[in-house]
């Protein structure tokens, strides 16, 4: 069964704020940031264990082109 992928509300707020800031810098840059987020989340969803472990069961995936990272955990109850 495919694990459930959850983005916490605080992370959603950070993503939205960053997209707005990038969008204010340059036309289309906010949308590019959101695409980078989507790609990163898709990669985590496909193979979460490919990313380096940073602390106990937490892993870190870096966004392409932007200085952001996503932290993830694979829990035992991912059914």
Image: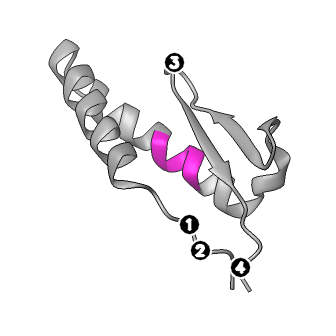
| Residue range (magenta) | 37-41
User: Decide: marks 2, 4 in contact (CB < 8 A)?
Assistant: no
Is label 2 in contact with label 1 (beta carbons under 8 Å)? yes
Up the image or down, 55 lies above or below 76; here it is: above
Q: Residues within 10 Å of mark 2 (few under 14, many from 20)?
A: few
Residue 58 location (% of width, % of height)? 72, 45
Q: Position of residue 31 (x, y in %)?
A: 30, 37
Residue found 39% across the figure and 32% down from its top: 33
User: Of label 2 and label 3, which has the lower sequence position?
Assistant: 2
Mark 2, secondary structure of its residue? loop
Horizontal placement of 20 versus 66: left or right? Answer: left
Name the secondary structure under disc 3.
loop
User: Which of the two labelled residues, at mark 1 and mark 4, occupies the earlier sequence position?
Assistant: 1
| Residue 8 sits above or below residue 51 on the image | below
Q: Residues within 10 Å of mark 4 (few under 14, many from 20)?
A: few
**Residue on which the image places disc 3:** 67
How many numbered marks, from 0 up?
4
Q: Which is more foreground, mark 2 or mark 4? A: 4
Real-space Cα distance between discs 2 and 1? 4 Å
Q: What label sits on residue 77 in the rendered view?
A: 4
Q: Earlier in the sequence, mark 4 or mark 3?
A: 3
Q: Earlier in the sequence, mark 2 or mark 4?
A: 2
Q: Position of residue 55 (x, y in %)?
A: 77, 37
Q: Helix, strand or loop at disc 4?
A: loop
Query: Going by the picture, which residue comes out furthest to the left?
Result: 24
């Amino acid at each position: 069964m495919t694990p459930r992928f959850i983005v916490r509300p605080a992370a959603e707020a950070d993503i939205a704020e960053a997209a707005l800031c990038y969008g204010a810098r340059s036309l289309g840059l906010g949308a590019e940031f959101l695409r980078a987020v989507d790609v990163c989340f898709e990669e985590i969803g496909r193979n979460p264990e490919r990313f380096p472990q940073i602390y106990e069961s937490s892993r870190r995936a870096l966004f392409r082109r932007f200085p952001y990272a996503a932290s993830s955990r694979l829990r035992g109850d991912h059914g």
